[in-house]
Amino acid sequence: MRKIQSFVTTEDVIAAARVLAWARNYLAREEEKVRRPYPPQTVCPYVEASIKANSLYMVFHNELNGEDAGSIADVILGYVNPFKEAPPFARHEQALKALLIVFPNIEEKFLGALDECHRTIKPKIVKSGLMIGQFHPRCREEAIHNPEWNAISRSPVPLVAIRNMTLHDIMFLHDDEQAFRAYESRFGSRFAQGGAFLYPYHKHLITCYERAKSAYADHQ
């Protein structure tokens, strides 16, 4: 049986154009406020390659205005398995795959619902081997290498991004035991023998990993 594709509305096309322009002109560009201790200084190092690989997906939920954070959370969690089942499937291409769940009609007074959803469902998302991030016009998320910059996750259209967990995500997951355990189960072997299995450009992650591993050692 032939699969029926989802309908795309005019609103979706307009929102998609805004999101894609933001991804290309902001996420994929260098920004001095990033202050990453290694190159590149792009806001997101993967976006440009993701777009070129045709692996940046978008879905739209115009029906939600943000008043019910629980409904938003349910929508996001519903995409975990479809995201995993979408191409590409090769291991070396997994970092290029991302899904933007776009909520064009969330009202300004309800934008905080995306922050609430992020806090609520992040443990489930991380446990499944994925990462989640919220973006909206008033988002105050701090840059990982520059806490003084709290505008890194601001976007013209409210959305949530999910992607596969990658090696560098220890920087986002080291301060929560359950999150660290989910990370360790996937990447812990790479840090064996003092990081002998890491590429040179990943060596800076060893300190963060070892600090977390030591902090939670007594809880096993």
Image (cartoon, rainbow, N blue to C red):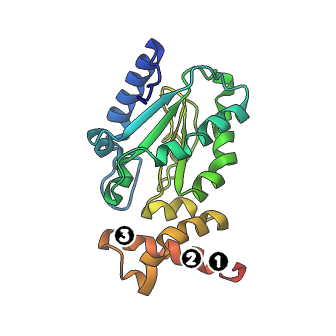
* Coordinates of residue 137 in the picture (x, y in percent): 54, 29
Please name the residue that numbered disc 3 is placed on. 202
Upstream in the sequence, badge 2 or badge 3? 3
The CA span between labels 2 and 1 is 6 Å
- Residue nearest the observer in this picture, 48 or 150: 48
Q: Residue furthest left?
A: 52
Q: Residue furthest bottom?
A: 193
* Coordinates of residue 216 in the picture (x, y in percent): 66, 76
Please name the residue that numbered disc 2 is placed on. 211
Q: Is residue 26 above or below residue 42?
A: above
- Residue nearest the observer in this picture, 96 or 33: 96
Disc number placed over residue 70 in the picture, else none: none
Circle 1: residue type: Ala
The residue positioned 43% from the left and 30% from the top of the image is 1
Upstream in the sequence, badge 3 or badge 1? 3
Q: Is residue 20 above or below residue 86?
A: above
* Coordinates of residue 14 in the picture (x, y in percent): 42, 17
Please give the count of numbered marks on the rendered protein: 3
The residue positioned 57% from the left and 56% from the top of the image is 128
The residue positioned 58% from the left and 77% from the top of the image is 213
Q: Is residue 196 above or below residue 120?
A: below
Circle 2: residue type: Arg
* Coordinates of residue 105 in the picture (x, y in percent): 58, 20
* Residue 22 quadrant: top left
Disc number placed over residue 215 in the picture, else none: 1
- Secondary structure of the residue carrying tag 2 is helix
